[in-house]
Amino acid sequence: MTKATGKHAPATVSVRDSSRWVVVSQVVKQVSQVATLYVLARLIAPAEFGVLVLATFVTRFVDMVIGDLGTASAIIQRQDLGEDEYSTIFWFNAAVGMVLTVLGVIAAPFMGPVFGSDRSAEVFQVAVLAFTIAGFGMVPQALLRKGLRFNQLVKVDLVVVVVTTTVALAGAAAGWGVWALVISNLAGGIANTAGVWGTSGFRPRRVYRVEHLRTVRSYSANLSLFRFVSFFSMFGDRFLVGRVLGERAAGLYTQPNRLNQVPLEVTAVMYRRVLFPSLSKMQDDLARMRKSYLRTVGAVVTAGAPVYVAMIVLAEPLVLALLDEKWTDAIPLVPIISGVGLMQLVSNSTSIVLQAKGRADLLLKREFVVFAVLGTGYGIGLTRGVEGVAWGYMIAVGFLLLPTLELSLRQIEQSMVGFWVNLWRQLAAIGCQFVVTWYVADQIADGAHWTKLIVATGAGVLSYLLVLVVSRDRHLGELLSMGAPALGRWYSSKIVKEDRI
């Protein structure tokens, strides 16, 4: 085995420094997506978004479950792989990507009955090109993440944002409809693969040995099965809405989920890109794992919670100001899906701990339970329409939150009580923000949508921050240190007197 050296050797980078790069990237990315959504919602009808939801259900499935068969995560988690293993995994992923594209093109003409939409089948036939594009970029991207080289990943992400936004807006303005969304996704994939190739320094050797794949087989197999089950847990609701209730219903249901992903991606990406490789490097040091885990969860909740509170309370002005009046039927869905997002700020961390500890087997068993509970929620909710599915989703996520959290906390010997004590200031701040946001919005009930949205959100966020500052919350200092190091140091030295983590 050839150990990784040079550019591929693990870097010594703190979680805080890594998070800073990720936050910069995600803030820019999500702000751009919101601006793009504002324009696209006015140029493209809800049914067009529904067509894309149905068509990309299968491509998402293949990309998430079969795309790399867990090998990219294995590269990050395993600390004993070298250049020969990386090259073997690269050729394997490239071959799998091309085979999946060919199979997708062949199968597309027969997918109409599966989607319940011939247009979705046409879109699917083009969308499967993403498999080949992604197959060539998985290993260099995994190596960048393994080395915590997030400054380089940020540059790639920013290029991808520019490419996808430009193509999507230009295509929508030209009247391409759903094809503007499809082509922009493919263009973004090409930009990402080209970017990670240019920055990672990885060049595959002419090596392909089956025994190298066997070294990651157990971990990768369990992780792939986990992703298989997890996919239907995560995206089954959207497919069911589109397949049973129609394309327009799928479009209406998708937009609240797209809004939900904006703060979730800014924060939860810290789990996938930063916390996972960081915990993997310290998996034999439980004390360090606990400290990094609690701090990261604290920073994520601190950053994401105020956004979700505003979305829950101000759903109506948000939809009418950001989307358009043709999306009015989506208003009742926004607070429900946003409630899910608020819980996911915590729940999304649970799988990361199990992956970092190499317990993909336990992760798989847990996911079977998650799938059963979520599937039951979707099925019962479907009988009551789109809003029923949203409620089923929220109730199921709430039911699963504590058991799945407990399972992961055991791996790092962290008590449940200690976990929530770590977040008590955030919980108090959330309650205060709810009250202030609702009161201010009620006082300007007759104002313009943008006015109500901006004023009530601003007042609520200020109350949220005030509670954290008065209670001397250390996680706010961590968060400030990521984006404004000088301010973070001042806050930590003047406000926070003691670090109990």
Image (tube, rainbow, N blue to C red):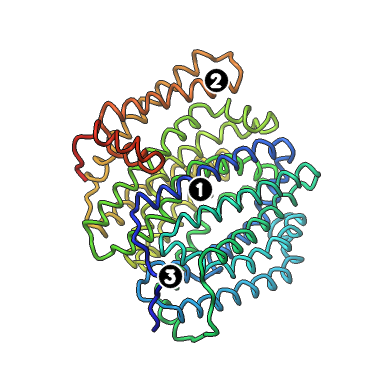
- Report, in whole angstroms, how far the alpha carbon at label 2 lies from the one at label 3: 50 Å
Between disc 1 and disc 2, the foreground one is: 1
**Left or right of 361 in this view: 319:** right
Question: Label 3 amino acid?
Answer: His
- Report, in whole angstroms, how far the alpha carbon at label 1 lies from the one at label 2: 29 Å
Residue labelled with disc 1 = 25
- Report, in whole angstroms, how far the alpha carbon at label 3 lies from the one at label 1: 22 Å
Residue 343: give x, y in percent of width and height: 41, 42
Between disc 3 and disc 1, the foreground one is: 3
Residue labelled with disc 2 = 452
416 lies above or below 224: above
Residue 141: give x, y in percent of width and height: 51, 64
Which mark sits nearer the N-terminus, 3 or 1? 3
**Left or right of 265 in this view: 469:** left
Question: Label 2 amino acid?
Answer: Lys
Query: Visible in this render: residue 486?
Result: yes
Any mark on residue 90, and which? none
Which quadrant of the figure contains the N terminus? bottom left
Any mark on residue 8, and which? 3
